[in-house]
Amino acid sequence: MIKIEDYPLSRVPQDKRVSFLSVAIVHMGMLTALDQFMLGAVLGNSMTLSEAFIAITIGSLIFGIVTFGLGLAGMREGISGSLLARWCGFGRMGSVLIGIVVAVSLLGWFGIQNAIFAKSLNFALGDRLGFALSASLSGLFLTVLVAFGFKALRITARIAVPLFILLVFFISYHVLSGQKLHDSFLLAPKGEALTISVGITIVVGGAIVASLMTPDLTRYSKNKRHVFGITLLTILAGEFVVNGLAIFIAKTIGTADVVTIMAQSAGGIGLLVVVFSTLRVNDLNLYSSSLGMVNAIEGITGKKLKYTSTTIIIGLLGTLFSVLGILDRFVDFLTVLGVVFPPIIGVMLVDYYILRTHRDALDASRSRGELPQKTPLIGWTAIIASIIGSTIGLMTEWGVPTINSLIAASLTYWLFNLLLRRSPRLQTTE
């Protein structure tokens, strides 16, 4: 059985590795939830069918390459993504900064998912509360739930993801039965049009946090074939099944609004499943964001924040994002994720597979089942290269933003290290 919180600062021993399916099921769960359905609905409502599937295919290829690369490194070393970053360019403090970026992105996801919860609640009550009050109540409810650990409700919420998958197949059959595939290709986008380059970027943005978290899971894998199979199954299930079905449904119904889709197709039961789905996903978003912030602050300042108070503060911030309309900026949010995270991953892959800066130390310590004795303090070149890559991805109007940011950061980091090879290192050790 996989427990992500196990072996937080050590390697997973070979005798603790688990079966292919044990890891694959958990990994697929990251891309078979409501957020992927929301992404597919946006693509279906804003692009032609062929454009949407081109975006999914190219986005999945990018996601697959970087995910397999990181996952393979995690499997070889038996360590989590945050630990891996320490010896892949970023150093101890740099990996803490990555943790903060992940925590902030999860805070954004909390705001988006809470907005869906609130819309469903308000719709079910006939708009009696209004969206702002609904979002405030649902955000406060979930914040209290996570902060004080009401396990009964959290356990109940765990059935939501399987129910949501069943609901997606039910709605697909209900909406698409009798619909000719040829007719779907002829339907014009009804929402604000998106280009293929933007579509690719938001596809990557919708999945890239899962890519960065992949070593947390594949450190339990036994070999590279398992890592490849896990990556492939997750892409097929998340991008081409959940995401793909959402494209067809949104295009047929003519809306990207998940609440409208569920209400029209499955009535009150659909709305109830959406509520439970957001409950489960946001349970994880808020928990992981709070834990990440607590660990980051401790790593930077040495001070231990209380988990409960940190969760309440982050939950209130996420709720505020919902009330202020973060759901209306869903595409912009995914675009930012799609250009901020690929540079980080690109730097890690270049360092681990090409520059191999700390591979000797990793190899030597792995044979002893330990971690390297010396830990780089902070990798300024990695941080600067990531910032340059993200800036290029956000500011340039040519090409595909997510590819631009990935290549720019990777090349910049590689060139920095070539130029500095004969100069004093910018990374200090402790």
Image (spheres, rainbow, N blue to C red):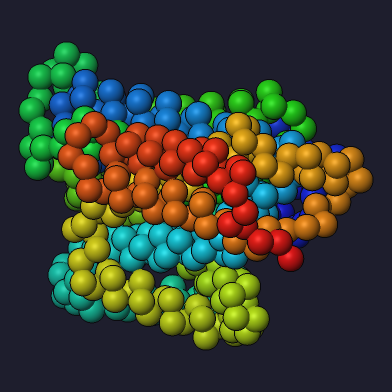
Q: Could you tell whether 295 is left or right of 180 in the image?
A: right
Relative to residue 385, is residue 315 depicted above or below?
A: below
Q: Nearer the viewer, residue 275 or 37?
A: 37
Image coordinates of residue 297 in percent, x first then y, are: 56, 76
Q: Could you tell whether 328 is left or right of 285 in the image?
A: left
Name the residue furthest front.
422
Image coordinates of residue 14 in percent, x first then y, are: 85, 40
Q: Nearer the viewer, residue 341 or 226?
A: 341
Q: Could you tell whether 65 is left or right of 258 in the image?
A: right
Relative to residue 270, is residue 229 depicted above or below?
A: above
State the image quarter where residue 193 is shown.
top left
* Residue positioned 48% across, 48% down in the render: 344
Q: Could you tell whether 370 is left or right of 239 in the image?
A: right
Quarter of the image with the C terminus in it: bottom right
Q: What is the count of numbered marks?
A: 0
* Residue positioned 49% across, 44% down in the render: 416
Q: Nearer the viewer, residue 169 or 46?
A: 46
Image coordinates of residue 211 in percent, x first then y, are: 51, 42
Q: Is residue 321 visible?
A: yes
Name the residue furthest right.
368
State the image quarter where residue 321 is shown.
bottom left
Image coordinates of residue 40 in percent, x first then y, are: 29, 38
Q: Is residue 239 visible?
A: no
* Residue positioned 35% across, 41% down in the render: 405
* Residue positioned 10% across, 33% down in the render: 189
Relative to residue 305, is residue 158 depicted above or below?
A: above
Name the residue furthest top.
182
